[in-house]
Amino acid sequence: MNWMYSIKHKLTAASLLFGVILLVMVTNINQRNQITELETAFEAIYRDRLVAESYILDFSEKLHTLQLAINDPSSSLVQKQRVANRLLTEIDTLNQLYQATRLTEEEAKYFLHFTGLTKEMNLRLKEGDLASEETMIQSAFMDLHFLSQIQLTEADKLKSKTDRIFHRGSLISQFEMVVLIVIGLLIQALLFASRTTGPPKWPTNSRMN
């Protein structure tokens, strides 16, 4: 019956080894998925938040320059219109770049209001109405403030997401290590048992020789 025990041990060991291979494969697939999730999150942080924030800074700088230009007492109306027209054209280009980023629902609302203001400022500029520009510039600054706050909030959400991915990956790695150690110990026990289990030894009678 020893050969039956040997086969049983070999089958058990083979099953454990198959379990090791399966565990490694599953862990490898999970790690690839985590890498993809991290790449997506980091790309979103850069493209949709950091780049968007840089556009907001550009918006603020140009609006501030516009504000100074239309309130400059030493400039004529024609000079003010020329400078304002150039700045509003640059702002319109930035509007298109900002629109290309991924906007949340709340962000889209404020940005739509902001672009509406810049279009209205451009119309008032063509009419020579610079007096109403100041009020619209202040309102545009408020929109930019809210848009900047949204960038911080969304970036924090993405950071929390990456933290969860790292934490999950760490737990899976620890679980894999524990399972591999347990399987390794079981295989060692099976090998030890197969070595100690030998064919039955029958007593010999020396008188029969």
Image (spheres, helix red, strand yellow):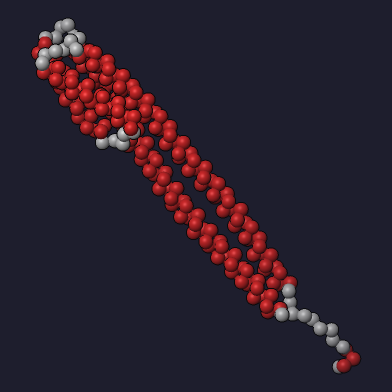
Residue at 22%, 24% in the rendered image: 116
Residue at 55%, 65% in the rendered image: 18
Q: Please determine whether, in this image, residue 56 is positioned above or below residue 193.
A: above
Q: How many marks?
A: 0
Residue at 74%, 80% in the rendered image: 199
If the image is split into quadrants, where does the C terminus sit?
Answer: bottom right
Q: Please determine whether, in this image, residue 200 is positioned above or below residue 9.
A: below
Residue 44 in the image, given as x and y percentages of width and height: 36, 38
Nearest the viewer among 129 and 55 is 129
Residue at 17%, 6% in the rendered image: 73
* Residue at the limit of the structure toward the top, as seen here: 73
Residue 79 visible to an observer of this rendering: no
If the image is split into quadrants, where does the N terminus sit?
Answer: bottom right
Q: Please determine whether, in this image, residue 149 is positioned above or below residue 75.
A: below
Residue 164 in the image, given as x and y percentages of width and height: 49, 40
Which quadrant of the figure has residue 4? bottom right
Residue 14 in the image, given as x and y percentages of width and height: 59, 69
- Horizontally, residue 86 falls left or right of residue 31, namely left
